[in-house]
């Protein structure tokens, strides 16, 4: 029997509520396929500050190190907002965990079913069939990780700088992820940069052109400046299929994708590491795109779909189980098409609870 070993970090707010439902759905999807789940839970974020005095306790890191993937909820909330910025749950847990496991590639599927186009702020006529795109963002390089400095100048003025740095090898490895994604989809990649202004973008564009021509000449590669990409995303998101871009541009564009796709409750994400796990697939961290939703936490009404779809990404990328992953994705879609919906995607239909949504998805598996 195949056994999947992963760490479960539910975190704060709605995290534990949607995680419970996602684990149930995972069991329902993997059990009939003869796959066993071996997982342990650990605290992360605000709850870890409360229980252990640190947002990312050593025991949590140790548990993740023994696992082949991490299923993550979300962290943070009003209770910890007054801590110094460096001690706040997101900064003190999420950034270090990305760094510790060299999670260099962030994949954010921008998926909006045709039946949910009302959830998007875009006019329905612009997205008659919904949205289906993927953003591949470089996650451990660029301006967020380059040298930073604040200094007082001779004339008393104060100057601060952040430096954007990229190596060709860092660009090539994120291109590999985009290439794999494009091959599994329509074969189109749009590389987003600012090559008219930034030296790192000149290298980015040259590398993308040469590397894709060499490694995957069958793919259709286009380039777009980031300012234009932001406009095009709001005008006609489906002109894209796979986007690949550097860290800061990806941070901004993937949030824009989140809003054009409507509810955060439907959006999953995967962050892949440089190391392979014992199954020969990338170690990865899988989490919903949204946060802890303090406004609805504790009420049992959060949408569990993003967490369930994140677990489907875990099966696909860290365990190579495409079939089971697709089954979960199809069951989520079928439940929504059958009008089983939590409040965030109800649009006049009766809203179900988190657990009822989970049961409906399990029934359709
Ligand atoms: P949020 O994503 O938590 O909430 C924004 C809106 O989306 C809210 O109205 C919320 O109810 C709704 N929403 C989000 N997920 C939902 C779901 N599954 N079902 C139904 N509705 C959902 O963003 P925020 O309010 O800006 O942040 C709240 C807290 O979450 C903050 O402490 C923030 O730092 C943290 N946060 C954590 C992560 C993470 O852990 N990766 C990401 C973003 C924000």
Image: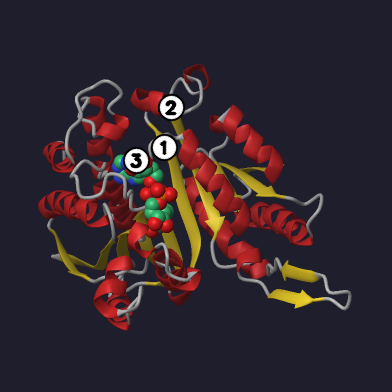
Distance from label 2 to label 3 (Cα)?
13 Å
Residue 111 shows which numbered tag?
1
Quarter of the C terminus within the rendering = top left
Residue corresponding to mark 2:
130
SS at mark 1 in the image? strand
Within the image, what quadrant is residue 345 found in?
A: top left
Within the image, what quadrant is residue 147 found in?
A: bottom right
Distance from label 3 to label 1 (Cα)?
8 Å
Give the crowd class for mark 2: few <14, some 14-19, many >=20 residues within 10 Å: many
Q: Position of residue 38 (x, y in %)?
A: 17, 68
SS at mark 3 in the image? helix
In front of the other: label 2 or label 3? 3
At horizontal 78% and vertical 70% (from top left) the residue drawn is 158
Which comes before the other along the chain, label 2 or label 1?
1
Contact check, label 2 and label 1, Cβ < 8 Å: yes
Q: Is residue 103 visible?
A: yes
Q: Position of residue 129 (x, y in %)?
A: 43, 23
Q: How is the image coloured?
A: secondary structure
Q: Position of residue 340 (x, y in %)?
A: 20, 29
User: Is 136 drawn above or below residue 82 in the view shown?
Assistant: above
Contact check, label 3 and label 1, Cβ < 8 Å: yes
Within the image, what quadrant is residue 82 found in?
A: bottom left
């Amino acid at each position: 029997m195949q056994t999947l070993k992963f760490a479960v970090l539910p975190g704060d707010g709605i995290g534990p509520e949607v995680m419970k439902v996602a684990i149930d759905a995972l069991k329902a999807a993997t059990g009939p396929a003869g796959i066993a789940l071996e997982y342990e839970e650990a605290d992360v974020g605000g709850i870890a500050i409360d229980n252990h005095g640190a947002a990312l306790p050593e025991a949590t890191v140790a548990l993740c190190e023994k696992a082949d993937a991490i299923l993550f909820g979300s962290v943070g909330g009003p209770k910890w907002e007054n801590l110094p910025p460096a001690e706040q749950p997101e900064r003190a847990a999420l950034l270090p965990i990305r760094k510790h496991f060299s999670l260099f590639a962030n994949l954010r599927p921008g998926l909006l079913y045709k039946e949910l186009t009302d959830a998007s702020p875009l006019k329905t006529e612009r997205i008659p069939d919904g949205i289906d795109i993927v953003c591949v963002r470089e996650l451990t390089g660029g301006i967020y990780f380059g040298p930073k400095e604040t200094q007082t100048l001779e004339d008393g003025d104060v100057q601060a700088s952040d430096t954007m740095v990229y190596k060709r090898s860092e660009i090539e490895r994120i291109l590999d992820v985009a290439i794999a994604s494009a091959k599994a989809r329509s074969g189109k990649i749009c590389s987003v940069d600012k090559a008219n202004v930034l030296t790192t973008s000149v290298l980015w564009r040259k590398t993308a052109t040469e590397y894709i021509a060499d490694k995957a000449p069958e793919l259709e590669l286009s380039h777009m400046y980031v300012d234009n990409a932001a406009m095009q995303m709001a005008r006609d998101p489906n002109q894209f299929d796979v986007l690949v871009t550097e860290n800061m541009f990806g941070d901004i564009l993937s949030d824009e994708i989140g809003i054009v796709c409507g509810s955060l409750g439907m959006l999953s994400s995967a962050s892949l590491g440089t190391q392979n796990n014992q199954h020969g697939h990338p170690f990865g961290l899988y989490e919903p795109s949204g946060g802890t939703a303090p406004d609805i936490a504790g009420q049992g009404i959060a949408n569990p779909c993003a967490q369930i779809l994140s677990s489907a990404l875990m099966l696909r990328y860290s365990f190579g189980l495409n079939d089971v992953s697709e089954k979960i994705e199809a069951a989520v879609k079928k439940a929504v098409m059958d009008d089983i919906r939590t409040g965030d995607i109800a649009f006049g239909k009766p809203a179900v609870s988190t657990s009822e949504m989970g049961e409906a998805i399990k029934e359709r598996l």
